[in-house]
Image (tube, rainbow, N blue to C red):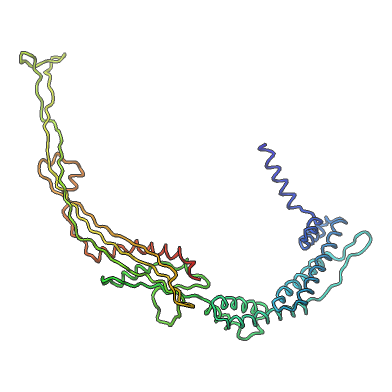
Amino acid sequence: MKKILPLFITTALLTFACKSSSKLIEEGNYDKAIDKSIKSVLKGKADDEEIDMLDRAYKLANTRDLERIKLLKAEGKPENWEQVYYIYSSLDYRQKEVRKVLPLRLKGRVIDYEQIDYTNSIVEAKTKAAEHFYTNGKRLMQVNTKQAYREAYFNFNKAQNFRGSAFSDVNELIADAEYLGTSRVLVDVSNNTPFRLPPEFYDNLLSFNTTGLNSQWVEYYLRRSDRQVDFDYFVTIQIKNIIVSPERFNQKEFIRKKKVQDGFSYVLDDKGNVKKDSLGNDIKVPKYKELVCTVLERQQIKEATVEVQIEYMSLNPNRRVMKMVPIAATSFFEHFSGKAVGDLDALTPDDLNLINRDPAPFPDDLSMIYDCTATLQKAITDAMHSNKNLIY
C-alpha cells in the first residue's frame, strides 16, 4: 500500500494538469483552452482535434465577450465602462495570441480570422471609465464622511490610472481624499491623582511602537504636536489612583541547633577497665555537644500600585466613549537582614548570609511609582493592539 499511494497521487495530479481542451471548453474556460492549443501548435504537437478545439474556443470566447459588451452598453451605466474596457482589452490580447499560429489548416480548409482593430473601442472605454471615476470621486467628496473620502481616493486613483493626463487636478484630489479619509488618533496621558509625576514618567508610558497600529487610513499621534491636527479619536491613559504602602518591618526569631563532635570517651567493661578490640586497641566512642544560636530576622516591605484606565473616545460625528480598559501595575520592595546571638557555628550558609546583611534604606515613593512604568507600558501596548479594531 505504501508504494501504491504515491503513484496514485502522481497520476491524479498529472490527470488534473493535462485537462483536455474540450473539457476546458465545456467548463467555459475558453482562454485556457486557447492557450493550451496554441502551445501545442507552436510545439508541432497539435493534431486536427486540437486545432478544431482552438477554432471553437476562439469563436465562443469572442461571441461571449461581444455579447457581454453589448449588454453593458445597453444598460447605460457609467460604471460599466471599466468592465467594457477590460473586455475589449481581452479581445485584443486574444486576437494577438492566436495570430501567432495563423493561418491553420484543418481537413482541407484554411482557418484564419479577420483582424479587428480594437484601438478606438479601447480608448473610448478607457476615457469614459476615467471620466466616471473622476466624476464619482468628486461626488463622494461632497458626502463628507471618512468612508466616502476613502472611496473617492480609490476612484481618483483609478481615474489617474486610466487617463490621468485628462484631469489636471487629479493628484491634488487624491491627496485631499487621502488626508480627509484618514482617522487621526491622539494618545495622551492624564494624571487624576494628587501625586506630582515627572515628565519622564509620562514619556515612558507613551514609549510604545505604533508600527502595528498605524495603517493606510489610521494615524496615531503620541502627545499633541505643534502643527494643527484635527483628531477623530482620543485615547487617554488616565492615571486613576496611586497607592503607596507605609514602610513596614516584620521581625521573627528562630533557633538553630546543631550537634558537633567534642572529643571521645573510652568504653569500659564491668570492672572499669578500657575495653580492647580484636587487635588490642582501646575502644573509643565519639562525644557530641549541641551548639545553639538564636537568629533575629528582619523583613522590610514597601509596595506601590498604579491603577490606570485607558479611555477610547470617538469625536466624530458625536463625542462618545467607546470603551474603557482598566490596567494596573505594582512594584514591590523587600529586603531581609538579621542578627545572631549564640554560637555562629550552628548556622546554615543561608543564615550566615542573612546576618551579614544590614538593613537597607527604603526607596522613596516616587522611585516606587516610577518602577511601575515598565509593567504599565507593556500592558498599555498590549491593550492598544488588542483594541485597535475600535478605530477605523
Q: Is residue 148 left or right of residue 212?
A: right
What x and y, as percent, mark residue 327?
Answer: 36, 63
Residue at the (12%, 36%) spot, across then down = 291
Where does residue 91 sit, x and y in percent of width and height?
A: 78, 70
On the image, which quarter does residue 224 sit in? bottom left
- Asked if 288 appears above or below 386 in the picture, the reply is above
Can you tell which quarter of the image residue 359 is in? bottom left
Q: Residue furthest bottom?
A: 168
Q: Is residue 35 visible?
A: no
* Residue 239 located left or right of residue 262: right
Task: Give 238 or 199, whichever is nearer the viewer.
Answer: 238
Q: Quadrant of the N terminus?
A: top right
How many marks on residues?
0
Q: Is residue 171 left or right of residue 108?
A: left
Q: Position of residue 116 (x, y in %)?
A: 83, 74
Task: Name which quarter of the figure residue 320 lies in.
Answer: bottom left
Regarding residue 115, the answer to whether it shows in the image is yes
Q: Position of residue 221 (x, y in %)?
A: 43, 74
User: What residue occupies the far right of the structure in this picture?
Assistant: 108
Q: Residue at x 12, y 21 (%)?
A: 284
Residue at the spot 70% in from the left edge and 42% down from the top edge = 7
Which residue appears farthest toward the left when viewing the image?
Answer: 272
